[in-house]
Image (cartoon, grey):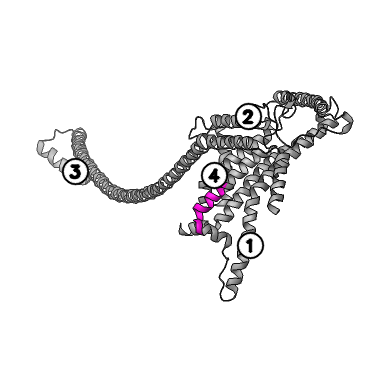
Amino acid sequence: MTKKNIFFALVLLFSAICISGEVSAADNSHGEAASGHSAESGPHVLPLYAEKINEKFSFISNSTIMVWISVLVIIVFCRAGAGKLGILPTGFQNFAEWVIESLYNFFGGIMGEHLVKRTFWFFGATFLLIITTNYLGLIPGVGTLWVGGKPLLRGGNADVNMTAAMAFTFALLWFYWAITENGFKGFLAHIFAPKGQFKGLMLPLMIFIFGVVGVLEIVSIAIRPVALSFRLFGNIYGGEQTLEILMGLGGKWLAFLPSLPFYFMEILVGGVQALVFTLLCAVFLKLICEHSDEHGEEHH
Amino acid sequence: MTTILAAGVITELTDQFGVNLPMFIAQVINFILVIIVLKKFAFTPIQAMLEQRRKRIEEGEAKLERIEKQLAESEARTAEAIAKANEESQRLIDEAKDSAAVMSEQKTQEAIASAQNILAKAEEAAKAERAAMAAELKGEFGRLLTATTTQVTGKVLSDDDKNRLNEASLQAVK
């Protein structure tokens, strides 16, 4: 990229941030007016929930639109990166291959070759969707363009419905993979059976202790999707709220300035949260499949 | 009681965070859509391509190893052939040297014989020439002696006198 292009990109970014700041400030006053708050009552607070765009279509929220945009970006990524694959990679194919190969090796390092071969489609897709949605949520205009008294766009993962959709889908798949890898009996044994070899009086004691631990494990398993959902939602919502409040501090023309450093932090958070979500899912799966996987690898 | 309390907390949470079934299902569908798109159009073809490339690289490595092995064998064979050729050429050179020495000796001997032959012939020719010169000298000397004797004595010599004089003078010259 030449210096001229970098200059134009910076000017464009600067203008976009200025405009978004201005729109945000205007929207804040709009929102405050709508909610009955005055300017003195404090900074604008984003609602905890995604808002419906149209009452007729109750399943479409401003967050759903962002996810659709993410899906479109991902489709473009697929077309550009894997549309015409050549044995000698050129252009965008290099990037697409690098992304997919790196993710595959990363999850393979956690779960092992057997499990990653079975489950990469889920982990790869989840990581790419989360990171794409998080980064698209940082584009000026998201949360600041208002239509019909509501923001048109909202960060995809700043909606518990979205994060819960991913977390509960994973929970279902986790059961499926765990049972197919261990067998139903093995799955229950993995949770409740005593680990180790015990004889005599120790055996009933350990059966009791591991039974209680198994019950706790069940509670832990039940809480996992909720924890996954709220961890991702909390981080992304918190980031958006931080940016929103900081934009309010800069006034009409310098709204972008206080929030600018936090944009860089949000870029980091967007990537880290995508990683944390998928990493935890991978670890949960590895833990339940560990026993059978070891046997599998021994057999191989 | 606990169940009712938990249900109340859950309802409160879902209301507070706007969790509702239609939106949840819509997001699940979006998520499944992303998985399908990525699996069908990115992961499967790219992983197949990576696998194909890995196989090609493996094949290339195997070929390279085979070629290197063949090259080493070929180099060994070439070195062996060169050594053999060197040995053969050395043998030929030695033979040529021996042959040249023999030939040189032979030619030298021939030259010596030829030279001796020429020398002998030259000596013979010189002897013959000397004999001829001696005969001529003798004739001349006899003629001069006869003429001198004739002039000194003033007498005409007969053929017997001439012969006797010649023989006497020739014996004196010898």
The numbered mark 2 sits on a residue in which chain? A
Q: CA distance from mark 1 to mark 4?
A: 30 Å
Q: Give the residue type at disc 2.
A: Ile
Asked if both marks, 1 and 2, belong to the same chain, the answer given is yes
Q: Is residue A93 above or below residue A186?
A: above
Depth check, front residue: B142 or A262: A262
First-in-chain label (1 vs 4)? 4
Tell us which disc is closer to us: 3 or 4. 4
Q: CA distance from mark 1 to mark 2?
A: 44 Å
Q: Give the residue type at disc 3.
A: Leu
> How far from the left and from the top, in percent, is residue A167?
62, 44
Residue annotated with mark 1: A213
Disc 4 crowd rating (10 Å Cα; few below 14, some 14-19, many 20+) is many
Q: Quadrant of residue B148?
A: top left
Q: Is residue A210 above or below residue B69?
A: below
Depth check, front residue: B123 or A278: A278
Tell us which disc is closer to us: 1 or 2. 1
Q: CA distance from mark 3 to mark 4?
A: 142 Å
First-in-chain label (2 vs 4)? 2
> How far from the left and from the top, in percent, is residue B58?
45, 45
Asked if both marks, 2 and 4, belong to the same chain, the answer given is yes
Image position of B125 (left or right of A210): left
Q: What is the residue that sits farthest to the right in this orientation?
A: A40
Image position of A155 (left or right of B54): right
Label 1–label 3 contact, CB within 8 A? no
